[in-house]
Amino acid sequence: MILCGGRVASDTPVSADPMPRRPAAKKFTRPSVPAAPLSPAICMLASGSKGNAIYLSDGQTGLLIDAGLSGVQIERRLLRRGLSPSNLDAILVSHEHSDHIRGVGVLARRYHLPVYITSKTAQASARQLGNIDKIINFTCGKPFKVNTLNIHPFSISHDAVDPSGFIFQVNGKKVGLATDLGIVTHLVRKHLSGCAVLILEANHDPEMLINGPYPWPLKQRVQGRAGHLSNMDTGHLLAEVAHDCLQHIVLAHLSETNNTPEKVLDAILPVVTDRKIALSVASQSRCGQLIDI
Ligand SMILES: [Zn+2]
Ligand SMILES: [Zn+2]
């Protein structure tokens, strides 16, 4: 993590994680690790095209936003930050792409967690999710609650049936999340204004994408209106929504082929350099630090 004042902290590789204890019986048993006391915080458990998962809590309700890694990997990464699946009250799904739902069914069944998902996304991902006891549908544009946690989902432009970004109210602050979006619409800009914490996609460096190994149709998809935001797009968006009370920006869903953390920071640092905003780049292979909200 980089603080614009210059503080740097690094994460430890996830491969150093202790193996979590698996439940003795697979159905509806929780691991032996007890739930840790919750505090208002967010943690990027994984981010990128090989799998996405984010832990968020308002201090009373624990939420897993997407589960694009295997159930075991997500358990490990929670444990790495002193958390356990017992800290989770629900899973929230942004869209049906595999890098966001791979572990949803397994975790929902293993820990008896309800899954919040739009009806179109549930239909599109039915095969991969399998049988889930409790599916609760939400609608983009209509706020809802998971226990104590207020959530406002909003539509984003991406090549999925009903993709969603989210605003969360945590500890009296607004937390914005938008990854997997091809363009920044007026709606996205409006929702992401006034946030204390922002998790935003910075997917690719346009030159690396154009000169890189992807086949032309895939290059077109990535840079298209329903693809992914470039570092430059994200910089423009941040220039519009950054404000004095923005505390932390997490740059997420980086392409491992068409981007580097250095390229991302080169594009974003000039936008935030005059403000005291903590900046971190989420990783595919390592879970991030717990960010207090
Ligand atoms: Zn994705
Ligand atoms: Zn996607």
Image (cartoon, rainbow, N blue to C red):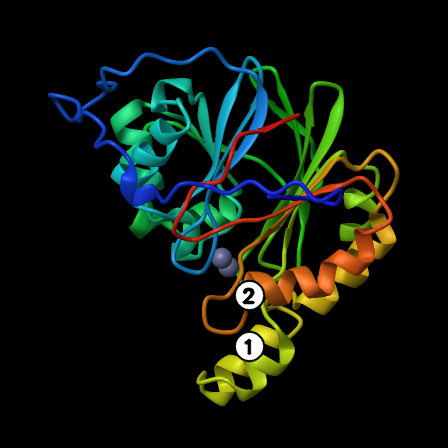
Label 2 neighbour load within 10 Å: few <14, some 14-19, many 20+: many
Q: Which residue is at the far left?
A: 24
Q: Amino acid at mark 2?
A: Asp
Classify mark 2: helix, strand or loop.
loop
Residue located at (78% from left, 43% from top): 191
Whether residue 216 is visible? yes
Compared with 257, 156 (above or below) is above
Gap between marks 1 and 2 measured at Cα: 9 Å
Discs 1/2, front: 1
Residue for badge 1: 221
- Is the residue marked 2 within 8 Å of ligand 2, measured from its CB? yes
| Whole-percent x, y for residue 264 in the image | 64, 62
Residue located at (77% from left, 44% from top): 192
| Whole-percent x, y for residue 216 in the image | 50, 89
Closer to the chain start, of discs 1 and 2, is: 2
Query: Relative to 87, is 230 on the left or the right?
Result: right
Quadrant holding the N terminus: top right
In terms of depth relative to the viewer, which is nearer, 160 or 245?
A: 245
Residue for badge 2: 159
Quadrant holding the C terminus: top right
Question: Is the residue under label 2 in contact with that under label 1 (CB below 8 Å)?
Answer: yes
Whether residue 186 is visible? no
In terms of depth relative to the viewer, which is nearer, 41 or 183?
A: 41
Query: Relative to 239, is 66 on the left or the right?
Result: left
Q: Amino acid at mark 1?
A: Arg
| Whole-percent x, y for residue 159 in the image | 55, 65
| Whole-percent x, y for residue 139 in the image | 62, 40
Residue located at (58% from left, 25% from top): 41
- Is the residue marked 1 within 8 Å of ligand 2, measured from its CB? no
